[in-house]
Image: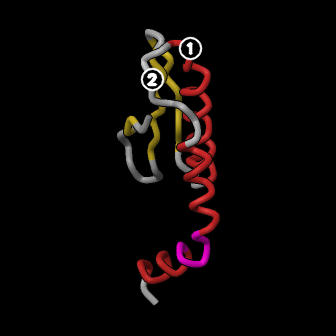
Amino acid sequence: MTQLSNSLKFFTNHTDYFLEQYQRLVRIPSVSTDKEHNADMLAACEFLADKLRGLGAGRRFSDQSSTIFLYGNARGYRKALRLF
């Protein structure tokens, strides 16, 4: 089996888990310019950071000018990507 085939088989066998995780994330009201939702935005960043940590990826937060960013990078890549 190829790596792609194995990945697709794994995803198919764990669809309920992935769907539940996605639903948990989208329930967090994290898209807002209202400062009252900063805690929600931080909760969404922490949720994603935990998932990245579980995958072995690096991650860091930047909380500048009341804007929260989540950066992540995978093993073997030097440049971090802004994810959230």
Mark 2 → mark 1, Cα distance in angstroms: 9 Å
For badge 2, the amino acid type reads Ser
Question: Residue 38: where, in percent of width, then height?
Answer: 55, 19
Q: Nearer the viewer, residue 11 or 6?
A: 11
Q: Is mark 1 on a helix, strand or loop?
A: helix
Give the numbered dot on residue 84: none
Quarter assignment of residue 21? bottom right
Q: Is residue 38 magenta?
A: no
Where disc 2 sits, the SS reads loop
Q: In this view, does 79 lie above or below 14?
A: above
Asked whether, in this view, residue 22 is left or right of residue 5, the answer is right
Whether the residues at callouts 2 and 1 have beta carbons within 8 Å, the answer is yes
Q: Which residue is the site of mark 2? A: 32
Percent position of residue 44, x then y? 57, 35
Residue 69 location, x and y as percent?
45, 27
In the rendered structure, find residue 36 and report the number of the disc placed on it. Answer: 1
Horizontal and vertical percent position of residue 41:
54, 27
Q: Say which of 28 and 58 sits in front.
A: 28
Q: What residue type is labelled 1?
A: Glu
Task: Residue at 56% x, 76% y: name it.
Answer: 10
Q: Identify the residue shown where x is 61% and y is 72%.
A: 14
